[in-house]
Structure formats: C-alpha cells, structure tokens
Image (spheres, grey):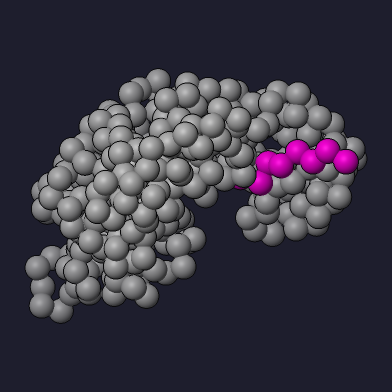
C-alpha cells in the first residue's frame, strides 16, 4: 500500500542528481579546512545570508548549540520564545552542556514582541544572571510554520543593540520564510549576528546545516564544533548535497506552500478547526476537537489507511508538505482523511 508521509520535511530523500553530485564530490580533511566542497558550501551559504563566514555542522540542533556556546558564558540567561525549537526539542543542551538559563517569553504566532524582550533583559544587578543572547525562530515550527518579517527582525535587532546583546536566528526553514515573503533570504538574516540554516528539511539534502556569522564568531564556533564532536573529515560527500540543494531546490519551495494551503482548505472543509491565514509556508496545524477524535487516535487510524502525520497534543495534529509530496498526493491524502473522519 502506498503511504503518503506528511510527518515532516525532514523525510525528504535525495534525488538521483543530488546523489550523483555526492558521488563525484571532491573531498579533503575538513578539520584541517582542506575539503574544497565543504569550503564551497560554507562560502555559498554565508554569501546568500549576507555574512562573512560559514561553518558546516551535522545538524540544526548542533548549529544552534554551537551558536549558544559561542555567544554566551556559563550562567548567562538566554531569551527564547516559549514554544521555540531550541527550548522544546533540543534536549536541554543549552543548560546541560552550556550552563545556560532559558528565559521564555510567549510570542504572537511565534514572534517575540520587542517590548516584551526589552522588559526581560536583565539589569546589571549582582543578584541576576546576565542576559547573554536573544534567540528567534523563522519560520516557527510549533506556531505552524509562521513567518517573522524583515521589519520585525530589524526591530528586535534594535533592542538587542540597545543592551549590547547578540541576536541569533534559528533559521532551520529560513528559505521557506523568504519564499513566503518574496524577499531575498539575506534580507531576513541580515539583522542577526548569527544564523543556523538546515539543509535537510525542505531543501532536500539528507544531512547537515550551516551556521553563519562574522569571521571572528565562526573561528570561535569552529573550536566549539570540534569540542562537541562535530568536526568531520571527508565531509564533502554530504556537503555536495547541500550545495546541490541551495542551487536547485530553493525556488520550488513555493510548491510546498501551495500544497499546504490546499491541504489546509481541504481539512477545514472536513471539519478540522484551523486558521487558514496562519498557513503561511509548508506546515499545517489543526485541531481535531470538532471531529470528536483525539490527535493520537487520528494519527493511528490515518497511518493504517496510508497517511502519516504527527499529533502535537491531545487535540492538535500537524501535516508538513515537502518535495517528495506532489499535488496528486495531497488530493489522495484528503480522500483518505475524508474516509477515516467520516
């Protein structure tokens, strides 16, 4: 039986041409800085995001952790959106490995209010941990793939500069945000001191992320990567997939957004509760309460029928479109969901 997998865009598989690029990649020892394909990927990512330098890392989680450890000292407080990926899904690495304290603020559709950030930056007080970093996420996963605008990010940078606190962007799906806004990805990243960009989600590479920032920051980050076990040797084989993704798989992200909107409209017609306007990119978040079924039960029944998705709470489910799902798959998925629901 065919299965339509809408659990996550991390499920994308490399195409034949991407595999060929990996097979033919020129390689060297990246720990010594001698892998030409890794170097080319780091330079391309940094250039696209408007930064001086890049650092290839195995995962977005490690990229974020390296940024946190590079920007901050043990005992620093880090301002985060309350539902952010760094806080919710990165195993508490910032605290367990960095000795950092999360200070969480509830955002609006995943976006932090500048006034709330300002109110939560610590004063220079002997009793308080210093604020070491402000983190934002674009697009925001748990908010349903919502986008933070260039103007919102610039305003947060102004607040950060007032207090001399760096601003880090978890840009796992930043190219999705750029596609949704119709802006160059560099515009979205330019206000931030550092950015972590995933290659293995909508861009379709099998593994890897790139952390970018100024040259001095990346020099320090490279040492932190080595400390965390992220120094790789002939990594050009996987870096080639990232280069292929940045060259060939960016423009097509708009297709994923179109498929997500179609899926959202279909789910709404079937009785799911969801905000169509919040479906801005490739993530559809819906409430099953009006259907009289819980998220876990619906997930189990849909998987049996041939559609995979995730539940995010008792009544909340999530569907994610990606390059291995086409419009016909969305039509078939809606037919299956209609049968299961009714």
Please state the horizontal and vertical placement of residue 145, each as a whole percent of the image.
51, 40
What's the magenta region?
A: 1-8
Please state the horizontal and vertical placement of residue 83, each as a whole percent of the image.
46, 56
Please state the horizontal and vertical placement of residue 165, each as a whole percent of the image.
16, 54
Taking the spot 35% from the left edge, 38% from the top edge, the residue there is 37
Taking the spot 52% from the left edge, 49% from the top edge, the residue there is 142
The reply, left or right, for residue 22 in relation to residue 326 is left
Q: Eyeballing the image, is 168 above or below 76?
A: above
Please state the horizontal and vertical placement of residue 262, each as a whole percent of the image.
67, 25
The reply, left or right, for residue 20 in relation to residue 238 is right
Taking the spot 33% from the left edge, 59% from the top edge, the residue there is 231
Decide whether residue 2 is among the magenta residues: yes
Which picture quadrant has residue 50?
top left
Decide whether residue 322 is among the magenta residues: no
Which picture quadrant has residue 150?
top left
Q: Eyeballing the image, is 71 above or below 253?
A: below
Q: Residue furthest bottom?
A: 127
**Residue 172 seen by the camera:** no
**Residue 241 seen by the camera:** yes
Q: Quadrant of the C terminus?
A: top right
């Amino acid at each position: 039986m065919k299965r339509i997998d809408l659990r996550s865009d991390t499920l994308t598989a490399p195409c034949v041409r991407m595999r060929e690029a990996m097979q033919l990649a020129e390689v060297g020892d990246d720990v010594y800085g001698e892998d030409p394909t890794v170097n080319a990927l780091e330079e391309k990512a940094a250039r696209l995001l408007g930064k001086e330098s890049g650092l290839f890392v195995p995962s977005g989680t490690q990229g974020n952790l390296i940024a946190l450890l590079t920007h901050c000292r043990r005992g620093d407080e880090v301002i985060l959106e309350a539902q952010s990926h760094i806080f919710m899904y990165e195993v508490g690495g910032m605290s367990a490995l960095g000795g950092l304290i999360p200070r969480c603020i509830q955002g609006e559709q995943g976006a932090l209010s500048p006034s709330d950030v300002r109110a939560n930056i610590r004063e220079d007080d002997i009793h308080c941990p210093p604020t070491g970093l402000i983190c934002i996420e674009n697009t925001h996963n748990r908010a349903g793939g919502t986008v933070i605008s260039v103007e919102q990010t610039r305003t947060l940078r102004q607040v950060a500069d007032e207090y001399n606190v760096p601003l880090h962007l978890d840009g796992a799906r930043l190219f999705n945000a750029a596609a949704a806004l119709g802006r160059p990805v560099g515009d979205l990243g330019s206000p931030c001191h550092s950015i972590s960009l995933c290659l293995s989600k909508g861009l379709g590479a099998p593994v890897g992320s790139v952390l970018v920032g100024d040259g001095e920051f990346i020099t320090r980050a490279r040492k932190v990567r080595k400390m965390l076990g992220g120094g790789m040797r002939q990594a050009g084989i996987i870096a080639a997939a990232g280069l292929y993704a940045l060259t060939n798989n960016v423009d097509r992200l708009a297709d994923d957004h179109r498929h997500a909107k179609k899926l959202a409209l279909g789910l709404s017609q079937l009785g799911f509760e969801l905000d169509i306007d919040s479906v801005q990119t490739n993530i559809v978040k819906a409430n099953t309460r009006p259907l009289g079924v819980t998220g876990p039960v619906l997930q189990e029944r849909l998987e049996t029928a041939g559609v995979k998705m995730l539940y995010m709470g008792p009544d909340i489910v999530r569907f994610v479109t990606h390059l291995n799902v086409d419009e016909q798959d969305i039509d078939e998925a809606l037919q299956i969901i209609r049968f299961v629901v009714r």
